[in-house]
Amino acid sequence: MLFNLNKLPSLPLQLNWKYSDEPELLCWTICARNYNTFAANCIFAFMSLTTAGAAYFLYSTSASNETELSKLTSCTGFYIFTMLIISCMTHQRMNFAYRFTKSGIEYCEWKEFPQWALTFLKWMTGITAVIFIFMATIDITFLIGALVGPGGMGLMYLTMANSKNYRELHTQYHHYAYKWKEITQLAIATNREIVDLKYSVTQKGDNYKTNWNLNIYCNRNQKKNVAAFIKTHLSPDVPFIRAKVNVPLSTDY
């Protein structure tokens, strides 16, 4: 297969478990959208309508000597290409790996450069170039479409493949570990497949407590079991609630 979208992520070599010498009590990996998905979906819907309007404008203002097929093909290609770029920004996912031991909770999160995007762009550039060149034998105006469509995709492919800054922007590796005694609240999210934890820790080099929250992303219908497991390792006075969890629009570092 060209793509395997259902493959679960495995821990990359850049990350290691802190308590690897302890037996794991619970562990799993998952790909999740670690941001406000409602806001992102609204942005995607708005940009979809805007792009459709732009495609229609291009269609209605195309040169009169162009055939209907030529105008329809170029405008459809513009819409699909633009929406693919937008979806990569509003629907990107982060990889998570969770591991619970007797010492506490630790997890890794990472985002690696999407090699599948390069493969997709390379194939799409070649396929659309062949189609436009073939259509140009029928109507010479398709050569313009070949420069705009496949030419633009080819330029993006070269940028993604050769730009170090672009690759670093889409690559992240992080590891975190918390002891059970540092958890101050446990919550089951009512709006997403998330178990939300509040914790209080003293960061290295600080002389004060840092209070923050941790979103544990779960597979479908898994969060109740995960929350119940966590509760057995917490102090009895730690609050256990159900609440709506507000995930920020972006949690990039």
Image: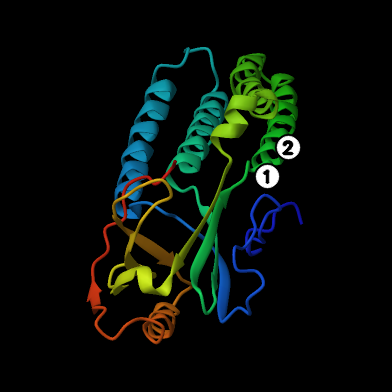
Res 123 label: 2
- At 33% from the left edge and 64% from the top edge, which residue is drawn? 199
Q: Callout 1: 10 Å neighbours few (<14), some, many (20+)?
A: few
| Kind of residue sitting beneath label 1 | Trp
Q: Nearer the viewer, residue 22 or 125?
A: 22
In the picture of the structure, the residue carrying the numbered disc 1 is 116
Instruction: Give the quarter of the figure containing the C terminus.
Output: top left
Q: Nearer the viewer, residue 241 or 177?
A: 177
Res. 189 image quadrant: bottom left
User: Where residue 202 sits: x, y (%)?
Assistant: 36, 56
| Kind of residue sitting beneath label 2 | Trp
Q: Nearer the viewer, residue 124 or 73?
A: 124
Q: Secondary structure at mark 1?
A: helix
Q: Callout 2: 10 Å neighbours few (<14), some, many (20+)?
A: some
Instruction: Give the quarter of the figure containing the N terminus.
Output: bottom right
**Disc number lying in front (2 or 1):** 1
Res. 155 image quadrant: top right
Relative to 115, say whether 196 is above or below. below
Kindly indicate whether the residue at mark 1 contacts the one at mark 2 (C-beta within 8 angstroms).
no
